[in-house]
Amino acid sequence: MDLKPKIREIMDFPKKGINFKDITTLLKDGQAFRASIKSMAELIRDRKPDLIVGPEARGFIVGAPLAYELGIGFVPARKSGKLPYKTIHAKYQLEYGNDVLEMHIDAINPGQKVIIVDDLLATGGTIFSTIELVKQLKGDILALAFLIELTYLNGREHLKEYDIYSVIRY
Ligand SMILES: O=P(O)(O)OC[C@H]1O[C@H](OP(=O)(O)OP(=O)(O)O)[C@H](O)[C@@H]1O
Ligand SMILES: Nc1ncnc2[nH]cnc12
Protein backbone atom coordinates (compact mmCIF):
# COMPACT_ATOMS: atom_id res chain seq x y z
CA MET A 1 0.00 0.00 0.00
CA ASP A 2 1.32 3.45 -0.93
CA LEU A 3 1.16 5.32 2.38
CA LYS A 4 2.67 8.67 1.40
CA PRO A 5 -0.51 9.98 -0.29
CA LYS A 6 -2.33 9.39 3.02
CA ILE A 7 -0.19 12.02 4.77
CA ARG A 8 -1.33 15.64 4.55
CA GLU A 9 1.33 18.34 4.21
CA ILE A 10 0.66 21.72 5.80
CA MET A 11 3.04 24.58 4.99
CA ASP A 12 4.13 27.02 7.71
CA PHE A 13 2.73 25.04 10.69
CA PRO A 14 3.39 25.54 13.57
CA LYS A 15 5.95 28.13 12.39
CA LYS A 16 6.87 29.76 9.08
CA GLY A 17 9.14 27.54 7.01
CA ILE A 18 8.02 24.23 8.56
CA ASN A 19 6.40 21.76 6.17
CA PHE A 20 4.26 19.83 8.68
CA LYS A 21 3.50 16.19 7.98
CA ASP A 22 -0.01 15.61 9.32
CA ILE A 23 -0.57 11.90 10.06
CA THR A 24 -4.19 12.32 11.21
CA THR A 25 -5.30 11.74 7.61
CA LEU A 26 -3.45 8.40 7.61
CA LEU A 27 -4.66 7.40 11.08
CA LYS A 28 -8.35 7.82 10.28
CA ASP A 29 -7.95 5.38 7.37
CA GLY A 30 -8.09 1.98 9.05
CA GLN A 31 -6.29 0.12 6.27
CA ALA A 32 -3.52 2.69 6.06
CA PHE A 33 -3.05 2.77 9.84
CA ARG A 34 -2.88 -1.02 9.99
CA ALA A 35 -0.50 -1.19 7.01
CA SER A 36 1.73 1.41 8.69
CA ILE A 37 2.01 -0.57 11.92
CA LYS A 38 2.48 -3.87 10.05
CA SER A 39 5.28 -2.33 7.95
CA MET A 40 7.07 -1.07 11.06
CA ALA A 41 6.60 -4.47 12.74
CA GLU A 42 8.15 -6.33 9.80
CA LEU A 43 11.17 -3.99 9.84
CA ILE A 44 11.98 -4.77 13.48
CA ARG A 45 10.43 -8.15 14.32
CA ASP A 46 13.64 -10.12 13.74
CA ARG A 47 15.53 -7.94 16.23
CA LYS A 48 13.46 -9.56 18.98
CA PRO A 49 13.07 -6.55 21.30
CA ASP A 50 11.74 -6.97 24.85
CA LEU A 51 10.17 -3.51 24.89
CA ILE A 52 9.05 -0.65 22.68
CA VAL A 53 9.72 2.84 24.06
CA GLY A 54 7.84 5.79 22.55
CA PRO A 55 7.81 9.55 23.35
CA GLU A 56 4.60 11.51 23.95
CA ALA A 57 2.35 12.06 22.11
CA ARG A 58 2.61 10.73 18.57
CA GLY A 59 5.16 8.12 19.68
CA PHE A 60 2.29 6.55 21.66
CA ILE A 61 0.05 6.39 18.58
CA VAL A 62 2.53 4.22 16.67
CA GLY A 63 4.44 2.67 19.58
CA ALA A 64 1.54 1.09 21.47
CA PRO A 65 -0.02 -0.79 18.52
CA LEU A 66 3.44 -1.82 17.39
CA ALA A 67 4.22 -3.33 20.80
CA TYR A 68 0.80 -5.05 20.76
CA GLU A 69 1.47 -6.45 17.28
CA LEU A 70 4.83 -7.83 18.47
CA GLY A 71 3.36 -9.13 21.74
CA ILE A 72 5.78 -7.11 23.90
CA GLY A 73 5.55 -4.28 26.42
CA PHE A 74 5.30 -0.55 25.77
CA VAL A 75 7.03 2.13 27.85
CA PRO A 76 5.92 5.77 27.46
CA ALA A 77 8.41 8.64 27.70
CA ARG A 78 6.17 11.46 28.88
CA LYS A 79 6.33 15.22 28.83
CA SER A 80 7.22 16.90 32.12
CA GLY A 81 5.00 16.43 35.20
CA LYS A 82 2.72 13.67 33.89
CA LEU A 83 4.19 10.54 35.47
CA PRO A 84 3.09 9.76 39.05
CA TYR A 85 6.05 7.72 40.38
CA LYS A 86 9.78 8.61 40.70
CA THR A 87 11.19 9.79 37.38
CA ILE A 88 14.36 10.51 35.43
CA HIS A 89 14.37 13.28 32.86
CA ALA A 90 16.12 14.55 29.70
CA LYS A 91 15.76 17.92 27.95
CA TYR A 92 15.41 18.19 24.19
CA GLN A 93 15.00 20.54 21.24
CA LEU A 94 13.02 19.95 18.07
CA GLU A 95 12.35 21.57 14.71
CA TYR A 96 10.05 24.13 16.38
CA GLY A 97 10.67 24.30 20.15
CA ASN A 98 12.06 22.55 23.23
CA ASP A 99 10.72 20.40 26.07
CA VAL A 100 11.55 17.81 28.77
CA LEU A 101 10.82 14.07 28.61
CA GLU A 102 10.50 11.82 31.67
CA MET A 103 10.38 8.11 32.35
CA HIS A 104 9.66 6.14 35.53
CA ILE A 105 12.86 4.95 37.21
CA ASP A 106 11.70 1.33 37.02
CA ALA A 107 10.35 1.47 33.45
CA ILE A 108 13.21 -0.59 31.99
CA ASN A 109 15.34 -3.27 33.68
CA PRO A 110 19.10 -3.11 33.04
CA GLY A 111 19.94 -5.10 29.90
CA GLN A 112 16.40 -5.23 28.52
CA LYS A 113 16.44 -5.01 24.72
CA VAL A 114 14.67 -1.86 23.59
CA ILE A 115 13.54 -0.40 20.27
CA ILE A 116 12.69 3.28 20.42
CA VAL A 117 9.81 4.32 18.17
CA ASP A 118 8.22 7.57 17.03
CA ASP A 119 5.92 8.71 14.24
CA LEU A 120 8.55 10.96 12.68
CA LEU A 121 12.29 11.64 12.68
CA ALA A 122 13.05 15.32 11.99
CA THR A 123 16.15 16.81 13.67
CA GLY A 124 16.44 13.83 16.03
CA GLY A 125 16.13 15.94 19.20
CA THR A 126 13.16 14.04 20.62
CA ILE A 127 14.65 10.65 19.91
CA PHE A 128 18.05 11.74 21.27
CA SER A 129 16.52 12.58 24.64
CA THR A 130 14.50 9.34 24.62
CA ILE A 131 17.82 7.53 24.02
CA GLU A 132 19.29 9.41 27.02
CA LEU A 133 16.45 8.15 29.23
CA VAL A 134 16.87 4.53 28.08
CA LYS A 135 20.63 4.80 28.65
CA GLN A 136 20.12 6.17 32.18
CA LEU A 137 18.12 3.01 32.95
CA LYS A 138 20.80 0.86 31.24
CA GLY A 139 18.48 -0.50 28.56
CA ASP A 140 20.13 -2.09 25.51
CA ILE A 141 19.05 -0.04 22.45
CA LEU A 142 18.74 -2.40 19.48
CA ALA A 143 17.40 0.13 16.97
CA LEU A 144 15.25 3.21 16.31
CA ALA A 145 12.12 2.95 14.15
CA PHE A 146 9.95 5.66 12.59
CA LEU A 147 6.90 5.76 10.39
CA ILE A 148 8.24 8.90 8.65
CA GLU A 149 11.79 10.18 8.15
CA LEU A 150 12.52 13.74 6.99
CA THR A 151 15.86 12.93 5.37
CA TYR A 152 16.49 16.61 4.48
CA LEU A 153 16.92 17.42 8.20
CA ASN A 154 19.77 14.88 8.56
CA GLY A 155 18.53 13.43 11.86
CA ARG A 156 20.52 10.27 11.08
CA GLU A 157 23.78 12.24 11.20
CA HIS A 158 23.37 12.70 14.97
CA LEU A 159 22.35 9.07 15.52
CA LYS A 160 25.12 7.30 13.62
CA GLU A 161 25.74 4.60 16.21
CA TYR A 162 22.18 3.26 15.90
CA ASP A 163 20.35 1.15 13.34
CA ILE A 164 17.51 3.30 12.01
CA TYR A 165 14.39 2.00 10.26
CA SER A 166 11.75 4.13 8.54
CA VAL A 167 8.76 3.34 6.34
CA ILE A 168 8.03 6.65 4.54
CA ARG A 169 10.81 9.07 3.55
CA TYR A 170 10.81 12.67 2.33
O1 LIG B 1 13.19 14.83 15.40
P1 LIG B 1 12.59 16.02 16.11
O2 LIG B 1 13.11 17.32 15.57
O3 LIG B 1 12.75 15.93 17.58
O4 LIG B 1 11.04 16.06 15.77
C1 LIG B 1 10.23 14.93 15.79
C2 LIG B 1 9.24 14.99 16.93
O5 LIG B 1 8.36 16.10 16.76
C3 LIG B 1 7.00 15.65 16.88
O6 LIG B 1 6.53 15.69 18.18
P2 LIG B 1 6.07 17.03 18.92
O7 LIG B 1 7.18 17.49 19.81
O8 LIG B 1 5.54 18.01 17.94
O9 LIG B 1 4.96 16.54 19.92
P3 LIG B 1 3.63 15.67 19.80
O10 LIG B 1 4.09 14.24 19.57
O11 LIG B 1 3.06 15.85 21.17
O12 LIG B 1 2.79 16.20 18.68
C4 LIG B 1 7.06 14.21 16.40
O13 LIG B 1 5.98 13.46 16.88
C5 LIG B 1 8.38 13.73 16.94
O14 LIG B 1 8.28 13.26 18.28
N1 LIG C 1 7.85 18.75 9.83
C1 LIG C 1 7.24 18.07 10.81
N2 LIG C 1 6.01 17.54 10.60
C2 LIG C 1 5.38 16.85 11.57
N3 LIG C 1 5.91 16.64 12.78
C3 LIG C 1 7.13 17.15 13.02
N4 LIG C 1 7.92 17.12 14.12
C4 LIG C 1 9.04 17.79 13.85
N5 LIG C 1 9.03 18.27 12.60
C5 LIG C 1 7.84 17.89 12.06
Image: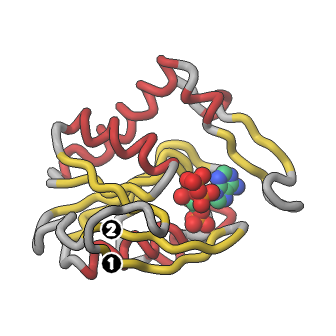
Left or right of 167, for residue 103: left
The residue where tag 1 is placed is 88
Between residue 155 and residue 61, name the one nearer to us. 61
Residue appearing at x 48%, y 43% in the figure: 167
Q: Are marks 2 and 1 in contact (CB under 8 Å)?
A: yes
Q: Quadrant of residue 111?
A: bottom left
Task: Determine whether, in the image, residue 51 is placed left or right of residue 42.
Answer: left
Query: Hey, which residue is sitting farthest front in the picture?
Result: 84
- Callout 1: helix, strand or loop? strand
Amino acid identity at mark 1? Ile
Secondary element at image label 2: strand
Name the residue that disc number 2 marks: 103
Q: Earlier in the sequence, mark 2 or mark 1?
A: 1
Q: Residues within 10 Å of mark 1 (few under 14, many from 20)?
A: some
* Residue 147 higher or lower than 144, as above or below: above
Q: Amino acid at mark 2?
A: Met
Q: Residues within 10 Å of mark 2 (few under 14, many from 20)?
A: many
In the picture shown, does residue 17 fall above or below 91?
above
Type of colouring:
secondary structure
Quarter of the picture for ligand 2?
A: bottom right
